[in-house]
Amino acid sequence: MSVRLLALIPVAVATSLALSAAVDAVALPLFLDTTGTILATALAGPAVGIATGVLTSAVNSLRNPTFWPFVVVQIVVALYAWLAARAGLFRNLKTALPAGFGLGVIAAVTSTPISYLVFGCTTTGGIALTTALGKALGLPPLGACFFGSFVSDFGDKAVTFALVTSVLHALPRRTAARFPLALRAIGTA
Amino acid sequence: MSFWYPATEAPALSNVSFAVAGGEVVALVGGVGAGASTALLVAADLAPRVTGGQIEGIVSRTERSGIVLPTPWTQSSGMAFTVWDEVAFGPANLGWPAQEIARQVDHALERLDIAALAERDPITLSGGELQRTIIAGVLAMDPGLLLLDEPTAELDPAGARAVWRLVRELAREGKAVLVATSDLDALPDLADRVVWLEGGAVRASGAPQLLADDAVCAAGLGTTVAGVWRAARLEPPYPLTVAEAVRRWR
Amino acid sequence: MRAAHPFTQLAVAATLPALAWTLPAPAAGIATAALALGLTATRGLRRGLWPALLTAAPFWLFLFLLHDARTTLAIGLRITTMVASFVWLAAALVPARLVEAMVARGWSVSAAYLIAATLSAVPTLRARAQRIVEAQRCRGLSPRGSLRNRMRALRALAMPLLLSALHDVDERALALATRGLVPGARRTPLRAPADPVLERLARWGLVLVCVGALVWRLV
């Protein structure tokens, strides 16, 4: 791993965590905690992305320990972002937004079993409430759990993909060219 | 040599050629975008190795080099929780034995006058203190070629004077120093040679007297005294230093 | 009391939740939760026990609403163990010591760098994000307004942060390269934490206990 990629990872992790300040300021129900992971992957590939995702989970867990089991989700996000970058899906919002929605579904599918097995669907208040609602409506427990994760993940991942697309396009060519995957991700390789 | 940054058409440096020997201080002057920083990166073997891009021509180095970049906070290693550890970062990476590291670090801290800060967390330092810490960190690696990019940007005049004194001392000890700076008034006492870069090419080079040259002053790169003399439409040749101006005036 | 070796701290914090999940509930849960809470208590009420209890409490509430008593107890104890172990680790682990421990063991400088640099980058970028938010507030940013406006505002906050962060990466790479950081190389340890034989044996012991529990459970 080159020095540049080694320098990228901590910065990418820190951006994922710092974006919570931005999200709070606009009072939107988003997390954006996979932004760094997706950005790092789109710039430099899956190994860097997975490292970023794992470290993001680790640092998040120091503040809130319940994040740790979801490290699996971060890894899946990195792999998905890698495939998206290889396919050049970050070339404009028309391709990035659907890809983001797709990731929302996959992220929800991945986090549901974790929510169910580790937390009994009480991961957050929101998920617990939607699960209760689902139960009341007669949904099977796993389905109700999925519904809760899905609601929060769907928009979050689409916004994240859109944001990463904007950033990649806003980078000066000479900076982007230094990262192995960046130009391919925005479709100008 | 000539150098292109990645994905750019125009070269950042074209046909730039100069040499720095041990014991010499060479200063690079130029406006923004003139290529001084790039030239330092090439000399430091960081361009194109870390920056990417293409190079044409020969760069020959006989010594290990260390470069100090302009913005201190991005040069902080991120791995040190005290100033002592920060300065020791470089030597530890080189794999030197612990005693040698201690010797070099203590020496460097003393030379930059920051021994009192040794136990502080680098995050709590002021810009000037951090800049001196970074310089100490590079110095502790004992490079034969020292490259400085605006080393006094964050320092007050007294701090800047101390750094320039240190640079001359290091040259006396046999190190080769290449410095890019906009502190032009310090150069007559500091530099053995001055190289004027414009648009990535060498426009002129020579003794510091160059900074009193008409063309250089017209470009805004002369010493303050020379600039004032020229602006007052007094007779060339312009004086380089205050002392010279005083002599001429009498 | 001298602090334990960072690897030992990690081993303990990993073992307790692992056992809570592998061994049969609720007995395992009670034991491990008690141990974990006991550890947090060693860190004091304010930094240890109270945050652990506070973080774990909501889960008990929601579990009680969603599940029967047996499930609530089983899952609740497991979550409490995990929460308490991490809270203890966050309070007890000193990052500088962990980094030095890794270097002293001959791990490559890359791994040590990643951990240390991440921990120091987080507060820096958080502060930068806060500054950007304040600057935008001066220009009229508010949490009210249509969804579209808020999304636009989010972009105006996030883009400068991300772009400046990426620019930093360039500079950091140069600085690291000139200070001799070679990925995969080893570096001289500066202040290796003490690692008495007893602790090393204890760590291996914990690993064996975890493996043993897993095997016992599967068999």
Image (cartoon, grey):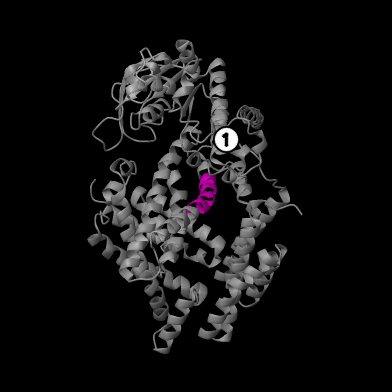
On the image, numbered disc 1 is attached to which residue? B133
Point out residue C142 in the picture as x, y percentages from the top left corner.
40, 66
Query: Is residue C91 positioned above or below C172 on the image?
Result: below
Point out residue C156 in the picture as x, y percentages from the top left corner.
35, 58
Point out residue C151 in the picture as x, y percentages from the top left corner.
33, 65
Quarter-of-image position of residue C187: top right
Residue placed furthest toward the front? B250
Q: Is A33 a magenta residue?
A: no
| Left or right of residue B240, residue B134 in this image | right
Q: Is C118 a magenta residue?
A: yes
Magenta-highlighted stretch: main secondary structure? helix
Query: Is residue A112 positioned above or below C197 on the image?
Result: below
Point out residue C69 in the picture as x, y percentages from the top left corner.
58, 85
Q: In this view of the protein, can residue B210 be seen by the observer?
A: yes
Q: In this view of the protein, can residue C219 be seen by the observer?
A: no
Query: Is residue C205 positioned above or below A136 on the image?
Result: above
- Which residue is rendered at x = 53% and y = 68% of the image? A66
User: SS for tag 1?
Assistant: helix
Quadrant into which the N terminus of chain B falls: top left
Quarter-of-image position of residue B205: top left
Q: Of the residues shown, which amino acid type is indicated by label 1? A: Thr
The span picked out in magenta is C111-125
Front residue of this view, candidates C143 and A127: C143
Front residue of this view, candidates A186 and B30: B30
